[in-house]
Image (tube, coloured by chain):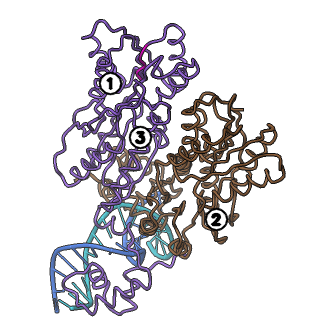
Chain colours: A purple, B brown, C blue, D cyan
Amino acid sequence: MSNNTTLKKISQILDISISTVSRALKDHPDISAKTKQKVTELANALEYEPNAYAINLRTNNSKIFGLIVPDISYYFYNTFISSVEEECRKNNYSLLILQSGDNPETESANIKLCRQNRVSGVFACITSSTANIEAFYKLKEADIPLIFFDKVPADNSFSKVCIADTEAARLAAEFIVQKQKKNVLGLFGNTSLSITQKRLSSFKEVFAENAAINLVIAHAISFDDAYEKCLACLNTHIPDTIFCMSDEILIGAMRAVQEKRLHIPKDVSVIALSNGFMPLLYVPQITYVETSGYQLGKLAFKNMMDSVVGNTVESEVFVPCRLVEGASF
Amino acid sequence: MSNNTTLKKISQILDISISTVSRALKDHPDISAKTKQKVTELANALEYEPNAYAINLRTNNSKIFGLIVPDISYYFYNTFISSVEEECRKNNYSLLILQSGDNPETESANIKLCRQNRVSGVFACITSSTANIEAFYKLKEADIPLIFFDKVPADNSFSKVCIADTEAARLAAEFIVQKQKKNVLGLFGNTSLSITQKRLSSFKEVFAENAAINLVIAHAISFDDAYEKCLACLNTHIPDTIFCMSDEILIGAMRAVQEKRLHIPKDVSVIALSNGFMPLLYVPQITYVETSGYQLGKLAFKNMMDSVVGNTVESEVFVPCRLVEGASF
DNA sequence: ATGAAAGCGCTAACAT
DNA sequence: ATGTTAGCGCTTTCAT
């Protein structure tokens, strides 16, 4: 049995009322210094820990945020989560983390869990196949603040924090143009994802203004797929530049480049959009546009706190991105 | 205001008692089919979600596990966490994740949080500088099951699940011997960590029986440090084999190897102890002994569940490891 | 088959 | 300065 110290227990031992104990522990001005001291001392000795459930039941404020994400171990998310957790701790919130395993049904179940746990707010990144955002609407209806991050639904009634996909892709494309490259292989992710669409259209736009550049686009749905698609391209012709829209794609592409024994940057230049870790693993280090999960986390938390206190939060906010030069050009 | 449906509300609408509603929703045998149907229908229509706090307060069973880890985003932990979370979901538990940022004070604060939230159990990986495990003892005293993983205290009164460090290092060493290598560079982590000590002594032992092999040992405390230490060694002499005791070390070492333009496996062979992701990033893929965070998570959860239902749990359990051959020999 | 009532631990309005 | 009381939403024992 847990040796649970409660206010009642303390009050009985000291032969005072429960409310006096409660107030004393909260440093309420009404309570005499003597009483406060007595109570605090006993509470410490008995290792009193307030029962979070009783408090939540009473105050209807759980001080817990829910976070729903396809997969914690996925490259990008763990830096985001780490960042959010850090802020939560600083602000006396806890974080209930739930994985949807990229399955919309699990995602719904997780939303339900958040509701059952009366979380103070939810951070969510939708699965790649989430078609029905009904469950998220219910959160809104229940007045639970909701901040979407990274993969977000189109609906404008939600708050979202995003990587500046358009700007990031443009930055990379402009860098390629500026370096006077002529033969570019652009490797992108799953066509159905909005993130892919945004990055691709922005990327293409820059090249549309530069007709002299030959641009080949390929799509891959996984690390392995990126390897194969890239290898197939390299077997046809060697471009002077490879662009990878994500870390996942970069890893696959680099495997192909290394297998073909292409030298970077002599034979081919490489640039990626990345969270910032993978590009540093290669020799030479890969030039990338940083899409920081850490920064995104900070921004998401800020918006969440605004939302919690009832401030209006801008519908869609972007994390600025920046070019980090390696030696791959 | 949240449109909170409660048992009371339902009971009032249907003009029956709260307990009947409660029972009907739990499919209690005493309740008539008619009533059950009426109640269930209304509950669905009103989107009734049981209030987890009221239940916990009443039943004293939060169905939440706490997980305390130095840093979520660290290579190894996120696969472990992902694995534990998966099991939690399957078993109707939730997971409260807390980072200690490798700071013993934050660690204590996190343990307190777990107690306040009346978690049903705690998974913990201690910080590298945790000297005082007082706070963990208090969890025990409060009858909260506690499973240590990966970095564990020496104390034998705790349940621990660990990577089989000794076996893993031995497996790698034996592989090197079997491949008739003669000049080995062994790169290890921070000397003060027990994980380093275990892996190192086991590794050395194998070579002690093979006097003909020249073994050089170096220690590094970070990815960058591993790079520098490895480069320094390579500048002195090129070994025929490099052993890396972790992913972190491997990344640093590979950077040095690539900068020196050494060809694997022609110029040098490489083997590592790894979670299993990093070795696949290189060309050729690196041979490694798998120390699986995923498996460790499964094992930890199993022990936790045993512990929760009051079964005695073995004090220290190891996850088996296995050699995965790449093409680096 | 259903209801009444107590109580989990806490807070806060309302006494005194 | 301290006590009394009601109630948050739920479960469960004990009636009926």
Chain holding disc 2: B
Q: In the image, which is nearer the foreground, mark 3 or mark 1?
A: 1
Q: Amino acid at mark 3?
A: Ser
Looking at the image, is A1 positioned above or below residue B193? below
- Identify the secondary structure beneath mark 3: helix
Q: Which residues are magenta?
A: A240-244
Do labels 2 and 1 touch, CB within 8 Å? Answer: no
Report x, y in % for residue B225: 52, 49
Q: Nearer the viewer, residue A255 or B159?
A: A255
Q: Which residue is mark 3?
A: A108
Gap between marks 2 and 3, in whole Å?
35 Å
Q: Which residue is mark 1?
A: A172
Q: Are marks 3 and 1 on the same chain?
A: yes
Q: Amino acid at mark 1?
A: Ala
Q: Amino acid at mark 2?
A: Ser
Do labels 2 and 3 touch, CB within 8 Å? Answer: no
Chain holding disc 1: A
Q: Which mark is residue B6?
A: none
Report x, y in % for residue B124: 54, 61
Gap between marks 2 and 1, in whole Å?
51 Å
- Identify the secondary structure beneath mark 2: strand
* Residue A242 within the segment the image draws in magenta: yes
In the rendered image, the quadrant that contains the C terminus of chain A is: top left
Q: Which mark is residue B159?
A: 2
